[in-house]
Image: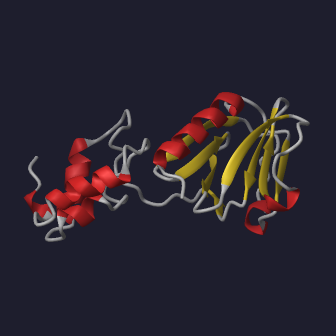
Amino acid sequence: MPEGDTIFRIARNLNQALAGKIVTRFETALPKLARESIRGRTIQRVRSAGKNLIIDFSGDLFLRTHLRMNGSWHLYRAGERWRRPHDDMRIVIGTEDFEAVGFNIPVAEFNGLPSLGPDLLGDTFDRDEAVRRIRERGGDEIADVLLDQRVRHQSVHSSRSADRRHASAHREESARDVAT
Protein backbone atom coordinates (compact mmCIF):
# COMPACT_ATOMS: atom_id res chain seq x y z
CA MET A 1 0.00 0.00 0.00
CA PRO A 2 1.44 3.40 -0.91
CA GLU A 3 2.36 5.36 2.21
CA GLY A 4 1.88 9.08 2.84
CA ASP A 5 5.24 10.08 1.34
CA THR A 6 4.35 8.33 -1.93
CA ILE A 7 0.94 10.03 -2.06
CA PHE A 8 2.62 13.36 -1.29
CA ARG A 9 5.01 12.92 -4.27
CA ILE A 10 2.18 11.87 -6.60
CA ALA A 11 0.14 14.92 -5.54
CA ARG A 12 3.13 17.24 -6.00
CA ASN A 13 3.79 15.92 -9.54
CA LEU A 14 0.13 16.10 -10.57
CA ASN A 15 -0.15 19.58 -9.06
CA GLN A 16 2.86 20.85 -11.02
CA ALA A 17 1.33 19.62 -14.28
CA LEU A 18 -2.37 20.34 -13.70
CA ALA A 19 -2.85 23.27 -11.29
CA GLY A 20 -4.44 26.25 -12.99
CA LYS A 21 -5.44 24.24 -16.08
CA ILE A 22 -8.95 23.73 -17.41
CA VAL A 23 -10.36 20.20 -17.64
CA THR A 24 -10.98 19.37 -21.30
CA ARG A 25 -11.62 15.65 -20.83
CA PHE A 26 -13.16 13.59 -18.08
CA GLU A 27 -13.72 9.87 -18.40
CA THR A 28 -14.44 7.33 -15.71
CA ALA A 29 -15.29 3.67 -15.37
CA LEU A 30 -16.82 4.37 -11.95
CA PRO A 31 -20.59 5.00 -12.18
CA LYS A 32 -20.58 7.00 -8.93
CA LEU A 33 -18.24 9.58 -10.51
CA ALA A 34 -19.96 9.67 -13.89
CA ARG A 35 -22.85 11.66 -12.40
CA GLU A 36 -20.67 14.75 -11.92
CA SER A 37 -19.32 16.87 -14.77
CA ILE A 38 -15.91 18.45 -14.25
CA ARG A 39 -15.28 19.35 -17.89
CA GLY A 40 -14.69 23.10 -18.10
CA ARG A 41 -13.70 23.43 -14.43
CA THR A 42 -10.28 24.68 -13.40
CA ILE A 43 -8.01 22.40 -11.43
CA GLN A 44 -7.07 24.58 -8.49
CA ARG A 45 -4.59 22.23 -6.86
CA VAL A 46 -3.73 18.61 -6.17
CA ARG A 47 -2.83 17.74 -2.59
CA SER A 48 -2.41 14.87 -0.20
CA ALA A 49 -4.16 14.36 3.13
CA GLY A 50 -2.78 11.30 4.83
CA LYS A 51 -3.13 8.50 2.30
CA ASN A 52 -5.80 10.37 0.32
CA LEU A 53 -5.05 12.21 -2.90
CA ILE A 54 -7.35 15.18 -3.41
CA ILE A 55 -7.90 17.18 -6.58
CA ASP A 56 -9.56 20.55 -5.94
CA PHE A 57 -11.64 22.00 -8.77
CA SER A 58 -13.27 25.38 -9.21
CA GLY A 59 -16.81 25.66 -7.90
CA ASP A 60 -16.06 24.09 -4.46
CA LEU A 61 -15.73 20.58 -5.83
CA PHE A 62 -12.99 18.10 -5.03
CA LEU A 63 -12.22 14.52 -5.95
CA ARG A 64 -10.80 12.26 -3.24
CA THR A 65 -9.06 9.04 -4.18
CA HIS A 66 -7.41 6.36 -2.08
CA LEU A 67 -5.09 3.94 -3.85
CA ARG A 68 -5.30 1.07 -1.35
CA MET A 69 -3.05 -1.80 -2.52
CA ASN A 70 -3.17 -1.63 -6.32
CA GLY A 71 -4.21 1.86 -7.38
CA SER A 72 -1.91 4.31 -9.12
CA TRP A 73 -1.95 7.68 -10.84
CA HIS A 74 0.04 8.18 -14.06
CA LEU A 75 0.72 11.45 -15.83
CA TYR A 76 0.97 11.55 -19.62
CA ARG A 77 1.35 14.28 -22.19
CA ALA A 78 -1.84 14.72 -24.21
CA GLY A 79 -2.01 11.97 -26.84
CA GLU A 80 0.83 9.93 -25.31
CA ARG A 81 0.30 6.16 -25.20
CA TRP A 82 -0.50 4.77 -21.75
CA ARG A 83 1.81 2.21 -20.17
CA ARG A 84 -1.12 0.32 -18.64
CA PRO A 85 -4.10 -1.32 -20.38
CA HIS A 86 -7.26 0.72 -20.91
CA ASP A 87 -9.21 -1.91 -18.92
CA ASP A 88 -7.30 -0.84 -15.78
CA MET A 89 -8.35 2.80 -16.22
CA ARG A 90 -10.78 4.14 -13.63
CA ILE A 91 -10.39 7.91 -14.07
CA VAL A 92 -9.01 10.22 -16.77
CA ILE A 93 -8.68 13.94 -16.16
CA GLY A 94 -7.35 15.69 -19.23
CA THR A 95 -6.19 19.23 -19.90
CA GLU A 96 -4.83 20.75 -23.08
CA ASP A 97 -1.31 19.54 -22.21
CA PHE A 98 -1.65 16.52 -19.89
CA GLU A 99 -3.76 13.51 -18.94
CA ALA A 100 -3.84 12.24 -15.38
CA VAL A 101 -4.94 8.62 -15.47
CA GLY A 102 -5.99 6.72 -12.35
CA PHE A 103 -5.51 2.98 -12.76
CA ASN A 104 -7.24 0.40 -10.54
CA ILE A 105 -8.32 3.04 -8.04
CA PRO A 106 -10.77 1.37 -5.64
CA VAL A 107 -11.92 4.46 -3.72
CA ALA A 108 -12.95 7.64 -5.49
CA GLU A 109 -15.66 10.15 -4.61
CA PHE A 110 -16.53 13.78 -5.06
CA ASN A 111 -16.57 15.92 -1.91
CA GLY A 112 -16.06 13.02 0.49
CA LEU A 113 -13.23 13.33 2.98
CA PRO A 114 -12.65 11.26 6.09
CA SER A 115 -12.13 13.14 9.32
CA LEU A 116 -8.37 13.38 9.68
CA GLY A 117 -6.57 14.86 12.64
CA PRO A 118 -4.15 17.78 12.34
CA ASP A 119 -1.31 17.28 9.87
CA LEU A 120 1.86 17.10 11.98
CA LEU A 121 3.99 18.41 9.14
CA GLY A 122 1.49 20.83 7.63
CA ASP A 123 1.85 24.59 7.51
CA THR A 124 -1.29 25.03 9.59
CA PHE A 125 -0.57 22.45 12.30
CA ASP A 126 -2.76 23.16 15.34
CA ARG A 127 -0.96 21.85 18.42
CA ASP A 128 -3.90 22.52 20.75
CA GLU A 129 -6.28 20.57 18.48
CA ALA A 130 -3.83 17.66 18.32
CA VAL A 131 -3.54 17.54 22.12
CA ARG A 132 -7.34 17.79 22.47
CA ARG A 133 -7.86 14.83 20.12
CA ILE A 134 -5.23 12.77 21.95
CA ARG A 135 -6.72 13.48 25.37
CA GLU A 136 -10.21 12.76 24.05
CA ARG A 137 -9.14 9.12 23.76
CA GLY A 138 -8.81 9.00 27.58
CA GLY A 139 -7.39 5.74 28.88
CA ASP A 140 -6.49 4.27 25.48
CA GLU A 141 -2.84 3.29 25.18
CA ILE A 142 -0.87 6.10 23.61
CA ALA A 143 0.64 3.69 21.08
CA ASP A 144 -2.80 3.00 19.62
CA VAL A 145 -3.86 6.64 19.78
CA LEU A 146 -0.84 7.92 17.86
CA LEU A 147 -1.41 5.46 15.03
CA ASP A 148 -5.02 6.65 14.54
CA GLN A 149 -5.17 9.16 11.64
CA ARG A 150 -8.33 10.68 13.09
CA VAL A 151 -6.14 11.90 15.95
CA ARG A 152 -3.21 13.07 13.86
CA HIS A 153 -1.78 12.38 10.43
CA GLN A 154 1.29 13.20 8.39
CA SER A 155 1.08 14.41 4.82
CA VAL A 156 4.70 13.29 4.43
CA HIS A 157 5.16 9.86 5.92
CA SER A 158 8.31 9.70 8.03
CA SER A 159 8.23 5.99 8.72
CA ARG A 160 5.33 3.90 9.91
CA SER A 161 7.79 1.56 11.64
CA ALA A 162 9.45 4.54 13.38
CA ASP A 163 6.00 5.64 14.59
CA ARG A 164 5.39 2.15 15.93
CA ARG A 165 8.79 1.96 17.66
CA HIS A 166 8.20 5.31 19.36
CA ALA A 167 4.67 4.38 20.32
CA SER A 168 5.76 0.95 21.63
CA ALA A 169 8.37 2.55 23.88
CA HIS A 170 5.54 4.45 25.58
CA ARG A 171 2.82 1.80 25.22
CA GLU A 172 1.84 1.79 28.90
CA GLU A 173 1.14 5.53 28.97
CA SER A 174 -2.43 6.59 28.40
CA ALA A 175 -3.73 9.37 26.19
CA ARG A 176 -4.85 11.40 29.21
CA ASP A 177 -1.20 11.60 30.37
CA VAL A 178 -0.15 13.68 27.37
CA ALA A 179 1.42 16.94 28.55
CA THR A 180 0.60 20.26 26.92
Q: Position of residue 64 (x, y in %)?
A: 60, 54
Left or right, residue 102 beside residue 161: right
Q: Quadrant of residue 171?
A: bottom left
Q: Nearer the viewer, residue 26 or 166?
A: 166
Left or right, residue 49 beside residue 121: right
Q: Position of residue 4 (x, y in %)?
A: 47, 48
Q: Position of residue 50 (x, y in %)?
A: 46, 51
The residue shown at (63%, 44%) is: 55
Q: Quadrant of residue 178?
A: bottom left
Question: How many callouts does the rendering have?
Answer: 0
Q: Nearer the viewer, residue 37 or 55?
A: 55
Q: Quadrant of the N terminus?
A: bottom right
The residue shown at (11%, 66%) is: 172
Residue lying at the far bottom of the rendered structure = 139
In the figure, 142 relative to 156: above or below? below
Please say which color scheme the image uses: secondary structure
Q: Quadrant of residue 157?
A: top left
The residue shown at (57%, 59%) is: 112
